[in-house]
Amino acid sequence: MDRANTGLNERLKKTKAIAELGQGMDVGSLNDYSHQIALYLLLKVFKREINNNSQRQRSDLISMTRAIVKEMRLPVKLEEIERLVDGVLYSGDPKQQSYFTVRIFDEKAGAIKEFKYRYLIPDRESSNWQEGGRTVYMLSETAQEIIFITREILEEFGFDLEQFYTLQLIKNGNFNEAKSSVSNLIARVRNLIKKEKDWRDRLD
């Protein structure tokens, strides 16, 4: 059978990861807002990451989440906040440190396959385990894609994270990923030029 590659599998990986973020955990009074809080936490972690702020340990994640909950004027209960942070770090019992797992269709293989992922992963360069340092977390590739997909939320940051991220890739010698990111930026510029042209045509 001729199976066209529509990119469905890769799209499902992203949409399922977004849909599952902050879900399936019992965080009491925060249950109705767990998805929003979890996404806000990823945004804050990413902002610290790209600014080389290593305050991204579990205790820092808890402090950030507590600040988010206070900002949202929701009940601040440490036990619920800790459960939510652990629910972003791992699936199920945090002691098991399990990956999140979803079953999605792979059109190339014509079968349902498991996709395992995490939102936050250890930042090996910042953790200093050899000196007894605690784990510092950074966004996984899946979480970065969530941030870029929802980039309209990032307008409050005052700068374009994708441009900044591309520069970081280039500085670190990761030219293949940088090339892909630049292609995305070029596509965005072309789209903006087209929109401006359409706007000018309507004024004429």
Image: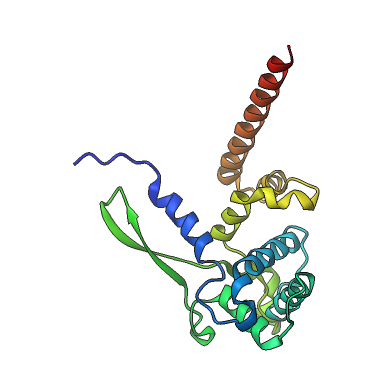
Q: Where, by quadrant of the figure, is residue 188 drawn?
A: top right
Residue nearest the observer in this picture, 54 or 184: 184
Q: Identify the colour scheme used.
A: rainbow
Residue nearest the observer in this picture, 101 or 170: 101
The image shows residue 131, relative to residue 108, as above or below, that is: below
Please name the residue shown 51% across and 62% down the image.
19
Looking at this rendering, what residue extends furthest in the left direction?
Answer: 1
- State which quarter of the image contains the N terminus: top left
Please name the residue shown 58% across and 56% down the image.
146
Image location (x, y in percent) of residue 78: 71, 86
The image shows residue 154, relative to residue 103, as above or below, that is: above
Image location (x, y in percent) of residue 43: 69, 61
The image shows residue 130, relative to residue 108, as above or below, that is: below
Residue nearest the observer in this picture, 130 or 116: 116
Image location (x, y in percent) of residue 159: 78, 47
Image location (x, y in percent) of residue 112: 29, 59
Q: Where, by quadrant of the figure, is residue 116 drawn?
A: bottom left
Please name the residue shown 60% across and 67% down the image.
35
Q: Where, by quadrant of the figure, is residue 128 drawn?
A: bottom right
The image shows residue 2, relative to residue 89, as above or below, that is: above
Q: How many marks?
A: 0
